[in-house]
Amino acid sequence: MLDRRRSPTRYIFLICEWPEAERPRERLIKLSAGALSDSELLAIFLDTVYQGQSAVNLARELIAQFEGLLGATHDGLLTCIGVGIGKNALLKAVRELGRRALAEH
């Protein structure tokens, strides 16, 4: 039987419990970054869970709340459950890397 973490409203399977072909990291390696959704790509950076919430679910919530991550502010991210100073810094760094990569072209 799979170990499930209980959230207040539903059971959430941890990514390590997902079939290997559905895990974001494995899909990235096997297929390509273009085959992943925004939330799956972001989940690879988030990497961890908070209170039974998978990284993919957290990524979906962040993208929905900020209508993408470009609109996310430092203070706004810190108000999100599952995002502390470390994840906030990581997300800011990822966003800056993306901005710099776009500026090169």
Image (cartoon, rainbow, N blue to C red):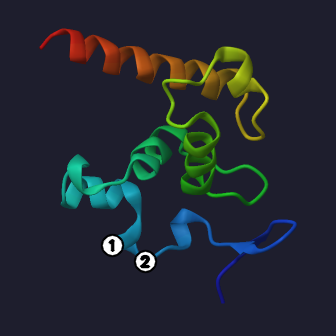
Q: Tell me where residue 57 appears, x and y as whole percent.
A: 60, 56
Residue 67 vs 72, above or below: the answer is below
- Observer-nearest residue: 4 or 53? 53
Q: Is residue 71 left or right of residue 82?
A: left
Residue in the picture at 22% in, 49% down: 34
In the orientation shown, which residue stands out farthest toward the left?
A: 105
Which amino acid does the dot numbered 2 rest on? Pro
What residue is shown with label 2?
19
Residue in the picture at 23% in, 17% down: 102
Residue 21 vs 43, above or below: the answer is below
What residue is shown with label 1?
21
The image quarter in which residue 22 lies: bottom left
Q: Is residue 32 left or right of residue 76?
A: left
Tags 2 and 1 touching, CB below 8 Å? yes
Q: Secondary structure at mark 1?
A: helix
Residue 12 vs 105, above or below: the answer is below
- Observer-nearest residue: 38 or 90? 38
Q: Secondary structure at mark 2?
A: loop
Q: Is residue 103 left or right of residue 96?
A: left
For the residue carrying disc 1, how many other residues have a C-alpha within 10 Å: few (<14), some (14-19), or many (20+)?
Answer: few
Q: CA distance from mark 2 to mark 1?
A: 5 Å
In the orientation shown, which residue stands out farthest toward the front?
A: 67
Q: Tell me where residue 1 appears, x and y as whole percent.
A: 66, 90
